[in-house]
Image: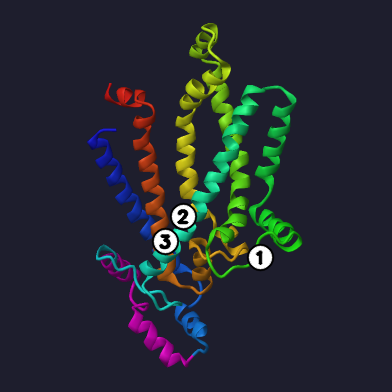
Amino acid sequence: MTRKDILRRLLQIVIVLFGVSFFTFCLTYLAPGDPVRAMYAAEGGIPNDEVIEATREAMGLNRPFLAQYFSWLNNLFHGDFGTSYSLSKPVLTVLLSRLWPTMKLALFSMALMLAFSVPLGMLTAVKEGKAIDYIIRGLTFLGISLPSFWVGLMLIYIVALKLGLLPVMSTDIGFQKMILPAVTLAISMTAVYTRQVRTAVLEELSQDYVVGARARGLKESLILWKHVFPNSLLPLITLLGLSFGSLLAGTTVVEVVFSYPGLGNLAVQAVTALDYPLIQGYVLLIAVIYMTVNLLVDLSYELIDPRTKRRGES
């Protein structure tokens, strides 16, 4: 990817962020409910209408939509994401305090997924049409179909309550707190990636260079791990980038089930409390992370497969 391509991608990211910010601000502006009343209710009481109206005026909520949007956008350019209505803290500070726990959970669940999906996918490809292939593929269908909230509840019931191996609730975000939610997220991803690895490896096994390597008498394990597996990585890396961005935004249900103090749990609390600045900041942060990860994935193609660089130059 040339410098011109990178600049073009960065420009696209800026344009998309403008669209995301406008669309999100529009939805929160049109959403039913009164954030001022919700803010006072969270503090323990609702004052009279005069105080509520004065608060709305002081917060700028009575201004026209475009005036509110451009004021928020101007503050955003200066690094000010606003102040959370429900927490009375800077939005950026709140988001960053929850970002690392969610990133740890996402990375841990992806590590678990890779540890199982890569060997299982390669095994089903090598044993295509055998009994083990059908068994693993059947299990992947089951893993894809199980809803994450149900899997999480079953893990809590069996592992935490019945077996007592892990705590049901924890006040920290240590390793033990991450195990059950990470396993919950990894189950569905392992099912998806096992099938993707199988497809990619089967496609490579049918290539001429594999036939030639076998004709030269190379060991099957050497062909599989030194030649087939590296050439199967490119589509998997694309999926990994998309999955990581999706995990950061899609851990909401699992975080709520396990009371995990991450971004997803924070987003649910913000929606419940009609905390518009927090909702807007959350959506914008997830959009930035998602597009940045995709850009890094595209840049990594040339490192993994130099042929992509030569094709781009030609």
Rendered image: mark on residue 103: 2
Q: Position of residue 206 (x, y in %)?
A: 55, 16
Disc 3 crowd, CA 10 A, few/some/many (<14, 14-19, 20+) = some
Q: Which numbered mark, 2 or 1, is in the foreground of this view?
A: 1
User: Does 15 lie within the magenta span?
Assistant: no
Question: Magenta span: helix, strand or loop, mainly?
Answer: helix
CA separation in Å, label 2 and label 1: 21 Å
Q: Is residue 144 above or below residue 209?
A: below
Q: Earlier in the sequence, mark 3 or mark 2?
A: 3
Check disc 3 and give the amino acid type: Thr
Q: Quadrant of the N terminus?
A: top left
Magenta segment: 47-75
Pointer 3: what residue? 24
User: Does 61 lie within the magenta span?
Assistant: yes
Q: Are marks 3 and 2 in contact (CB under 8 Å)?
A: no
On the question of residue 29 being in view, the answer is no
Rendered image: mark on residue 168: 1
CA separation in Å, label 3 and label 1: 35 Å
**Observer-nearest residue: 277 or 243?**
243
The residue that appears at 42% across and 55% down in the rendered structure is 286
Left or right of 143 in this view: 241? left
Q: Secondary structure at mark 2?
A: helix
The residue that appears at 31% across and 50% down in the rendered structure is 15
